[in-house]
Image: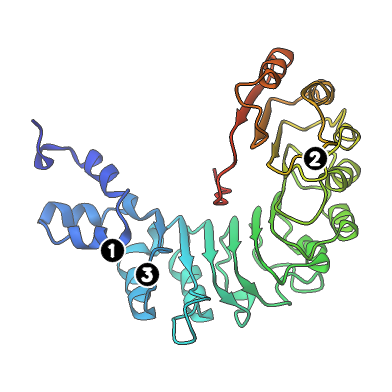
């Protein structure tokens, strides 16, 4: 039987990559070889710190000792609900990320109070910014603010960000490279605001609207009016009807359509009606239906047979977590 000592470095690195950060540091004390492997740049490309309530001193040590130029993506928690004495993300720490981690492309922040953090503190190299249950400053996403902030930002995820509202949606135009937008639980965005916002963001190629108060019909209508070049649409089906889905017919660039339950209403289009609309989309290659209760049913057979050129995915209820980078 092969022992750990006999495994090649590449295999051990792969194993170590599944360990939480704290355990990675601990195993560096086992032997000289493991210490060398823990120092390997490859092991620190993707770091998840959401498991810990971490003192600022420890975070600064990780930044200087392990991450630095190696870091590509980082997930952090801000401890918004941990009490007033809990450590918070500071502008100085976020600026240091930008200075010491020139290869950082993705930053994912959870339950963080960013209301006193200027958006100019964020690393300018970011291509993806995810905010999950975060408090942000009202000035972060206002249209008249400096358009040179985050010049490379291509994707933004706003998941349960209570301050986000209609005027912020239009303010996203300040990010000139933005192509992907995910709205999750942004209950202050109205149908009128979405329509006006998408008119300003007509260059978006991916849009996901999940768990919001907007009806699927009004969302698809706004998409059909303004996002003619959109390639991927993902949304919950609350308020979806056959006429509402039909507004997407003939969308020239749409490659992927995902409809998520479980809010099924009597107006929900039948499998045959979904098939009819999808057949008019010349570039559609992926149709995904989650949480509609159609897996293993006649509906799945109808769609698979009617769309031989597409990958048809029929699944049970979607995951509770919002992992948008997949």
User: Would residue 258 be found to the left or right of residue 65 on screen?
Assistant: right
Q: Residue at x 63, y 74 (%)?
A: 135
Determine whether the residue tagged by mark 1 lies in a helix, strand or loop.
Answer: helix
Q: Position of residue 228 (x, y in %)?
A: 85, 39
- For the N terminus, the quadrant is top left
Q: Residue at x 65, y 63 (%)?
A: 160
Task: Give the vertical position of 4 relative to 66 (above or below).
Answer: above
Determine whether the residue tagged by mark 3 lies in a helix, strand or loop.
Answer: helix
Assess whether mark 2 and mark 3 are in contact (beta carbons under 8 angstroms): no
User: Would residue 274 be found to the left or right of residue 286 on screen?
Assistant: right
Q: In terms of sequence position, does the residue under pointer 1 or pointer 2 come before the other?
A: 1
> Closer to the observer: label 1 or label 3?
1
**What crowding class fits label 3: few (fewer than 14 Cα within 10 Å), some (14-19), or many (20 or more)?**
some
Task: Give the vertical position of 5 relative to 280 (above or below).
Answer: below
User: Would residue 142 be found to the left or right of residue 100 on screen?
Assistant: right
Residue extending farthest to the bottom is 85
Q: In terms of sequence position, does the residue under pointer 1 or pointer 3 come before the other?
A: 1
Residue that carries the numbered disc 1 in the rendered image: 22
Residue that carries the numbered disc 3 in the rendered image: 63
Q: CA distance from mark 3 to mark 2?
A: 50 Å
Q: Position of residue 37 (x, y in %)?
A: 21, 52
Determine whether the residue tagged by mark 2 lies in a helix, strand or loop.
Answer: loop
Q: Residue at x 48, y 83 (%)?
A: 83
Q: CA distance from mark 1 to mark 3?
A: 14 Å
Task: Give the vertical position of 258 relative to 97 (above or below).
Answer: above
Q: Residue at x 68, y 34 (%)?
A: 292
Assess whether mark 2 and mark 1 are in contact (beta carbons under 8 angstroms): no
Q: Position of residue 259 (x, y in %)?
A: 71, 37
Q: Position of residue 14 (x, y in %)?
A: 29, 43
Residue that carries the numbered disc 2 in the rendered image: 265
- Splitting the image into 4 quarters, where does residue 67 fall? bottom left
Q: In terms of sequence position, does the residue under pointer 3 or pointer 2 come before the other?
A: 3
């Amino acid at each position: 039987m092969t022992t750990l000592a006999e495994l090649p470095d590449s295999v051990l690195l792969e194993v170590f990559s599944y360990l939480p950060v704290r355990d990675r540091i601990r195993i560096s004390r086992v032997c000289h070889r493991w210490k060398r492997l823990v120092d390997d740049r490859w092991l620190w490309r993707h770091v998840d710190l959401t498991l810990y309530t971490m003192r600022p001193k420890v975070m600064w040590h990780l930044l200087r000792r392990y991450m630095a130029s190696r870091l590509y993506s980082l997930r952090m928690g801000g401890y918004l609900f941990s009490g007033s004495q809990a450590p918070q993300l500071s502008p100085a720490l976020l600026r240091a990320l930008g200075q010491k981690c020139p290869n950082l492309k993705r930053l994912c922040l959870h339950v963080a109070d960013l209301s006193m953090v200027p958006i100019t503190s964020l690393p300018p190299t970011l291509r993806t910014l995810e905010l999950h249950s975060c408090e942000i400053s009202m000035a972060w996403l206002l249209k008249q603010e400096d358009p040179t902030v985050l010049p490379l930002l291509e994707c933004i995820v706003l998941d349960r960000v209570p301050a986000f509202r209609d005027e912020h949606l239009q303010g996203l135009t300040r990010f000139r490279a933005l192509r992907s937008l995910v709205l999750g639980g942004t209950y202050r965005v109205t149908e009128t605001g979405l329509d006006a916002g998408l008119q300003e963001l007509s260059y978006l190629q991916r849009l996901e609207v999940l768990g919001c108060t907007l009806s699927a019909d009004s969302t698809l209508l706004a998409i059909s009016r303004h996002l003619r070049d959109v390639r991927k649409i993902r949304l919950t089906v609350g308020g979806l009807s056959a006429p509402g889905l039909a507004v997407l017919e003939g969308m020239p660039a749409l490659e992927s359509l995902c409809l998520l339950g479980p809010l099924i209403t009597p107006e929900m289009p039948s499998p045959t009606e979904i098939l009819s609309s999808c057949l008019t989309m010349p570039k559609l290659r992926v149709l995904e239906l989650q949480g509609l209760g159609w897996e293993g049913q006649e509906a799945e057979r109808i769609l698979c047979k009617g769309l031989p050129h597409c990958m048809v995915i029929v699944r049970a209820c979607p995951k509770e977590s919002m992992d948008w980078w997949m």
